[in-house]
Image (cartoon, grey):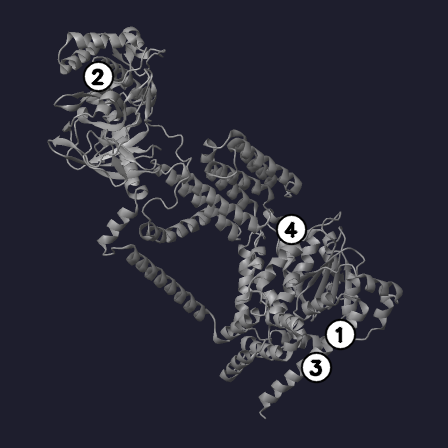
């Protein structure tokens, strides 16, 4: 066996092993957050697709628990930033302080310098503070006073947002919403799971006892494996048809951007990987389509009464070929 | 299909388009519908429009709509006495369509409304088949089609112009089909879809009865009675007498034809001079006769000639007809039968006694009948008689009152008085009604005869000469006969044209325009409305098709060729699009659709397989095998020809 072939074999083996670990991680997460299998699966997909996650829902449905849980099972170092209306960019990025000993400015990294950042209630902050975080997310680095500081890798932001109709919020502009790969809604648990939740142990206690099931290195390897999921031409055509539909249908004010197209594809690949496949199927695209598009598509004025979920559901009726 | 439709969501613009185009289709019906119904229909439309402006669309409740429906049924029934037939049917159609607006929700409802709109538009033909109406219907059809496109093209930001362009494209594509169907679709001689009995019931025109004032009423109308194209040169105005009903019987006030319907086997009169050949295009007038130039020598196939030389048809003329004729302007008819003599001398007792006395006095004073006739004409000419469109109303002895009191009358006054005088003087006389004169259209080279050219004149029977035409109107108002009705009443007819365009240049251009427009209408009548089985066979014989059977074969061949060409084209296009794997999968899906499992166009292979297995667990191993192969072939990077064959076999072997 040639060395090249054997290395391919090992990467393939490695990949399968990593996927197994990923599946285990998912199983563990399902034991902590009950009855949200699909949401957790999507969150994990978002993570291995190297995207950032926006969770929009009422307070108290488990947004923060999800962030803690991910940090815990993935062994990532974790920082939480509570966004407030008087927050300044330096509170997020860090600040340079004059050090008398070395007679120079020294950069004190802010909370954003960590592998998993929970940006809680991101729409409470002013646009200035919001954009500081969003720029860091996009660039994977922070530039202050002419110095560039790279962010750690993996770097994953979970931002939570209260529904925009609540008082004292600054709605994230569309251009910044586009930086999030997915927007998820947690939703209330169903009756049976809620009962279990009420009877069971305190979730925080469970979190403390959890072990790391997927190491950061394994996560990085998985993130690289995503792009190797094979995408056939017919699926590229299908995705283009979906994009075309959003650009020409009367439901939406704007169509999806090419960046959104790339994001959908990467996400679908990650979903296929999580499903232990090395090739993409139309179902993969359909599975992640609502979560990846519902914050990118605004209903048009004519259909302003349409719920976002309903507007997005029309995407799923685009014929395959 | 259902899923397909559910895919579409109707935008408010589409509703507005629909309302606008339906309003267009409805508008001409307002003239015929009872006012209550028109108002109701418009109200429903406005209602829907205002609903559409609100943020949420709330339609009236079902019970309320049912009540409205009952109201409409009652109104239609009260007004027409029936719910069926042409008028009531159209009224119902219009109202139901308007009511439909109040329950339109789904795409299906919209499609129904649009199709009914097409239907409503086509009913316009029942009233009016003129060129402007055809143009109007074209606009309506265009709008409705644009609405249909708007409904189906779920495209955002689509400009109206894109919509209209597409409609224009569709119409252009439909044009050849329309022409082929128009020219080639076999036309059955006689009306296949005959118009209902009440068609053209309000048509104006000469009737088979005459009373004082009945023709002068017509003279206000500019409506066209018929058009005549002469083969050689146009005849002089003073010979242009177009023969209609012949009236014998009178009670002193009213005139009717009596029992003169004997059909003559052959036309027995001695004709002299040159024959005049011409073609008449007669507008529908809802009467059972045709008009021919005095005196007709031939009969068209649709009519027979009676002893009065009147062209009589079996059925009332309810659609535009066209016939070729030959007439002679110089003629000598034969002797009079005893019965005819009696009828031509009939006078009502105790009526118009002064006129009768005058006639009798002439008979005693003057010897020859010819001299009496001349004397009477002189009498009309020298006494202060005047020719007027607005004669005073006359009482129980109208002829006496007219001759000795009012002395102002229209052609029927002169014809009737003359006849009474002649009959009193012992000369057999009858009244002929019809048209006299007409405008010559120099652009289309034909004569236009209008309702205002309606005329009544007389015929006296003289020994050795037979029936001789005498027009007493000519001795009162010769210009009426020489130059036609228009010049006789120029101040009335030309008020609109000449007063506005005092300028001579403008006037002549206005005339040209009018003639041009009429000649366009004439061509429309000749070639579109008048395109019947006869013309069709003439046209087809030019290309060598002689019989209906041959034509049917030719049509069939044309249709089959066109269809197979289309089929071939679409199959080929499909082939090119789809690779072999997709074709096999398509066959697989087709096979499953035979047991009622239909793959949705957006359904991925895994989902579909899952659905099949849930519905038919017994098929699981086969389905999974096929699905795995298909996925491998379609979505995985490398595959072999072997795998394709394998998939093909699996699909073929699949037993359901």
Upstream in sequence: badge 3 or badge 1: 3
Residue, disc 3: A17
Q: Which mark is residue A306?
A: 4
Q: Is residue B232 above or below residue B618?
A: above
Other residues around mark 4 within 10 Å, as few (<14) / some (14–19) / many (≥20): some
Identify the secondary structure beneath mark 1.
helix
State yes or no: discs 3 and 1 in contact (Cβ < 8 Å). no
Task: Report, in whole angstroms, how far the alpha carbon at label 3 lies from the one at label 2.
Answer: 120 Å
State yes or no: discs 4 and 1 in contact (Cβ < 8 Å). no
Q: For this view, does A101 lie left or right of residue A144? A: right
Percent position (x, y) of residue B89?
49, 39
Task: Tell which subunit mark 1 falls on.
Answer: A
Percent position (x, y) of residue A121?
75, 56
Task: Report, in whole angstroms, how far the alpha carbon at label 2 lies from the one at label 1.
Answer: 117 Å
Task: Report, in whole angstroms, how far the alpha carbon at label 4 lies from the one at label 2.
Answer: 83 Å
Task: Tell which subunit mark 2 falls on.
Answer: B
Identify the secondary structure beneath mark 2.
helix
Residue B158 in view (yes/no): no
Residue, disc 2: B472
Q: Are marks 2 and 1 on the same chain?
A: no
Q: Which mark is residue A25?
A: 1
Q: Are marks 4 and 3 on the same chain?
A: yes
Upstream in sequence: badge 4 or badge 1: 1
Task: Report, in whole angstroms, how far the alpha carbon at label 4 lies from the one at label 1.
Answer: 37 Å
Which quadrant of the rendered structure holds the C terminus of chain B? bottom right
């Amino acid at each position: 066996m040639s060395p090249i072939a054997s290395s391919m074999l090992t990467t393939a083996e490695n990949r399968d092993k990593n996927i197994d670990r990923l599946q285990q991680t998912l199983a563990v997460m399902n034991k902590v957050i009950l009855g949200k299998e699909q949401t957790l699966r999507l969150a994990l997909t978002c993570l291995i697709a190297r995207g950032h996650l926006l969770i929009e829902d009422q307070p108290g449905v488990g947004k923060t628990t999800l962030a803690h849980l991910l940090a815990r099972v993935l062994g990532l170092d974790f920082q939480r930033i509570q966004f407030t209306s008087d927050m300044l960019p330096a509170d997020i990025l860090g600040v340079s302080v004059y050090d008398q000993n070395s007679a120079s400015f020294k950069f004190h990294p802010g909370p954003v310098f960590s592998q998993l950042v929970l940006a809680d209630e991101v729409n409470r902050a002013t646009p200035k503070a919001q954009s500081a975080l969003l720029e860091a997310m996009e660039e994977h680095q922070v530039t202050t006073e002419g110095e560039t500081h790279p962010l750690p890798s993996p770097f994953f932001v979970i931002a939570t947002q209260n529904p925009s109709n609540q008082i004292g919020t600054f709605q994230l502009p569309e251009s910044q919403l586009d930086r999030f790969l997915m927007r998820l809604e947690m939703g209330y648990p169903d009756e049976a799971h809620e009962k279990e939740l009420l009877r069971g142990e305190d979730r925080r206690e469970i979190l403390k006892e959890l072990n790391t099931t997927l190491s950061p290195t394994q996560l990085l390897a998985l993130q690289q494996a995503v792009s190797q999921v094979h995408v056939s031409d017919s699926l590229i055509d299908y995705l283009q048809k979906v994009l075309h539909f959003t650009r020409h249908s009367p439901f939406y004010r704007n169509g999806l951007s090419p960046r959104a197209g790339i994001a959908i594809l990467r996400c679908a690949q990650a979903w296929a990987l999580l499903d232990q496949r090395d090739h993409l199927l139309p179902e993969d695209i359909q599975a992640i389509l609502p979560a990846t598009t519902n914050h990118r598509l605004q209903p048009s004025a004519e259909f302003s009464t349409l719920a976002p979920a309903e507007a997005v559901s029309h995407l799923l009726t685009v014929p395959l070929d | 299909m259902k899923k397909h439709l559910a895919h579409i969501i109707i935008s408010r613009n589409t509703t507005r388009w629909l309302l606008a185009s339906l309003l267009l289709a409805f508008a001409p019906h307002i003239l015929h519908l009872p006012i209550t119904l028109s108002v109701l229909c418009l109200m429903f439309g406005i209602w829907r429009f205002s609903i559409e402006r609100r943020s949420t669309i709330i339609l009236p409740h079902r019970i309320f709509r049912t009540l409205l429906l009952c109201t409409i049924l009652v109104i239609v029934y009260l007004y027409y006495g029936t719910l069926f037939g042409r008028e009531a049917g159209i009224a119902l159609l219009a109202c139901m369509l308007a009511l439909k607006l109040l329950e339109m929700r789904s795409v299906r409802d919209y499609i129904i409304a649009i199709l009914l709109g097409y239907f409503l538009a086509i009913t316009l033909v029942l009233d009016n088949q003129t060129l402007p109406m055809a143009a109007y219907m074209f606009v309506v059809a265009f709008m409705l089609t644009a609405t249909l496109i708007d409904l189906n093209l779920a495209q955002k930001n689509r400009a109206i112009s894109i919509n209209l362009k597409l409609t224009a494209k569709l119409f252009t594509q439909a044009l050849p089909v329309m022409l082929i169907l128009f020219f080639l679709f076999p036309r059955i001689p006689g009306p296949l879809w005959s118009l209902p009995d009440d068609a053209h019931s309000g048509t104006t025109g000469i009737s088979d009865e005459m009373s004082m004032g009945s023709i002068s009423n017509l003279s206000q109308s500019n409506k066209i009675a018929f058009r005549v194209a002469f083969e050689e040169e146009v005849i002089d105005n003073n010979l242009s007498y177009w023969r209609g009903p012949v009236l014998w019987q009178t009670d002193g006030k009213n005139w009717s034809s009596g029992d003169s319907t004997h059909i003559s086997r052959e036309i027995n009169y001695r004709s002299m001079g040159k024959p005049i050949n011409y073609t008449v295009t007669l507008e529908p007038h809802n009467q059972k006769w045709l008009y021919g130039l005095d005196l007709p020598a031939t009969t068209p196939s649709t009519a027979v000639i009676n002893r009065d030389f009147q062209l009589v048809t079996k059925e009332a003329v309810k659609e535009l007809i066209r016939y070729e004729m030959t007439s002679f302007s110089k003629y000598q008819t034969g002797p009079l039968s005893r019965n005819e003599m009696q009828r031509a001398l009939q006078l009502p007792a105790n009526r118009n006694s002064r006129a009768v006395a005058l006639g009798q006095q002439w008979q005693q004073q003057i010897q020859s009948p010819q001299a009496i006739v001349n004397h009477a004409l002189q009498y009309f000419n020298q006494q202060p008689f005047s020719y007027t469109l607005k004669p005073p109303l006359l009482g129980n002895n109208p002829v006496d009152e007219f001759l000795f009191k009012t002395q102002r009358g229209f052609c029927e006054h002169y014809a009737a008085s003359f006849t009474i005088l002649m009959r009193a003087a012992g000369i057999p006389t009858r009244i002929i009604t019809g048209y006299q004169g007409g405008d010559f259209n120099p652009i289309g080279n034909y004569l236009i005869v209008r309702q205002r050219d309606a005329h009544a004149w007389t015929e006296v029977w003289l020994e050795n000469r037979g029936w001789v035409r005498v027009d007493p109107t000519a001795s009162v108002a010769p210009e009426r006969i020489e130059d036609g009705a228009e010049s006789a009443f120029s101040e009335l007819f030309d008020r609109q044209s000449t007063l506005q365009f005092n300028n001579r240049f403008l006037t002549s251009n206005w005339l040209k325009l009018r003639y041009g427009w009429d000649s366009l209408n004439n061509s429309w009548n000749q070639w579109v409305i008048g395109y019947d089985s006869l013309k069709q066979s003439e046209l087809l014989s030019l290309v060598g098709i002689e019989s209906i059977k041959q034509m049917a074969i030719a049509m069939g061949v044309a249709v089959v060729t066109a269809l197979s060409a289309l089929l071939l084209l679409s199959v080929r296009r499909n082939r090119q699009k789809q690779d072999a794997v997709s074709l096999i999968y398509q066959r697989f899906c087709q096979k499953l659709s035979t047991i009622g499992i239909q793959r949705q166009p957006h359904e991925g292979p895994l989902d579909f397989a899952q659905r099949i297995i849930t519905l038919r667990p017994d098929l699981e191993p086969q389905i999974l095998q096929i699905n795995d192969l298909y996925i491998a072939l379609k979505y995985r990077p490398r595959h072999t020809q072997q795998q394709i064959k394998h998939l093909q076999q699996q699909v073929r072997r699949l037993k359901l």
